[in-house]
Every structure is written in structure tokens, then in C-alpha cells.
Image: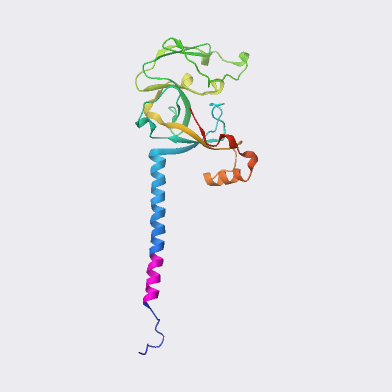
Amino acid sequence: MVRPKGASTVTPRSVDLQRRSRSVWREYAEALIIAVLLALTIRTFVVQAFVIPSGSMLPTLRIGDYLLVNKLVYLFRPIRRGDIVVFKFPQDETRDFIKRVVGLPGETLEIRDRQVFIDGKPLHEPYAVYSEPPLLRSPTPYHLAPMVIPPGHLFMMGDNRDNSLDSRSWGLLKESKVVGEASMIYFSVRRADIPSGALLSRILYATFHPSLMRWDRIGHLLR
């Protein structure tokens, strides 16, 4: 058999290799698309990452703590007192806030000289701290007349009671504004001002600067 001059040689083996190559790239592309869709689904409906930018929840949460927030938990149980939740700030819903649930729907809440009362009984709050000297404290946030929390609303407070913008200032939170419950610290750095950018780049930066890491906080479960 004589091939025409200049004709390329195509063998069954080369055709098979080309098909396999296209198949491999197709599998990679499909896997990547599935991974992206899965990540978006998880972020939207299951769990989302947040970083703590302020000290309003000290000492429970520190500036530079990175949290995983469970967005499904309240489909299976009601919001409970003591839960640490992320929510849309009522005065600017483009901002996410994080506070602790102190008062629940139907309860009568009162604050007298820093002590929170629920239905007339003092609330035990081992997580709450007051860091400002007595002479610098404003009496307004530490006294609140008895109020009945209506259905579908929550009374939120930061653990750092002297430095927290919470329900004492902006009022009650609608339960529908709750994003989810903060469940775990998965990463923590001593400074929040590490270079901006993708989360992975920030983690790598902190990893190569060990003095920035708070190793003892990584994996800490929140209660």
C-alpha cells in the first residue's frame, strides 16, 4: 500500500490516546464544576466561615478568630439562651454581627445594675465580663426597665458588656435575621491585619509566621 506524499499517519492507537486525553480533561472539568457547585451549596445552606473583627465578644471570641457557622442547626431545634449566633445587623443588613442570645420570646427581661433578670430571676452568666473602671461606665446600658420579648424576637448581648453594640442600644432582633450558630474556631491569628486576600493566602501567611498563630484556639468548640 502506497500513501500519498505528505499525508499524515493516523493509527487506531493515536486516535485512542486522543480520546483518552479528551476524556481525562472532561473528567477534570466536571469534577471542578461539581466541587464549585458543592462549595457554593454548602456555603449558602450548610456552613459558612466568618472572622471576628472586634472585641465585643471577649473573652469568648478574640479579634482574629475564624469561625464556622452552622446554618442548618435551627431547622432541627429552637434557638436557645446562651447560643452564640451570627445575624444580619438590623440597622444595616449588609453587615453580619455576632452576639449571644440572652432573652427569648415570651420572657420578661430586665437589667438592674448590670444584672440581667429573666422573669424576675437573676440570670447566671459566667461568660459576661465588665472591663471598664466603675467611674467610666455609663449608667444607661446597665439599667433596662422590664420588657416582654414578643414572639419571633430575641434579646442579644455581647460577652464584653462594656464594649458591645447590642440589643441595649438597637433593640430586639427578629429571629428571621439569624444566619446560624457559631460552632467552632477553625483558625486564629493574633492580628486581624494580616494581608488581605483569599482565605487560603491568609492562612499560608500566618503559617509561615508562627508568632501570629493562636494554636491553642484552633478546633475550639463554642458553647
Residue at the extreme bottom of the image, as rendered: 2
Q: Which percent across, then down, holds residue 62?
A: 56, 31
Residue at the extreme right of the image, as rendered: 211
Colour convention: rainbow
Q: Is residue 198 visible?
A: no
Decide which of 77, 8 is in the foreground and name it.
Answer: 77
Residue at 40% across, 45% down: 40
Q: Which percent across, then down, holds residue 168?
A: 48, 19
Q: Which percent across, then down, holds residue 34?
A: 38, 51
Q: Is residue 67 above or below residue 3?
A: above
Q: Is residue 17 magenta?
A: yes
* Prevailing secondary structure of the magenta residues: helix
> Magenta residues, as a range?
12-22
Q: Is residue 70 visible?
A: yes
Q: Is residue 56 above or below residue 122?
A: below
Q: Quadrant of residue 175?
A: top left
Q: Is residue 190 left or right of residue 30?
A: right
Q: Quadrant of the N terminus?
A: bottom left
Q: Is residue 60 above or below residue 200?
A: above
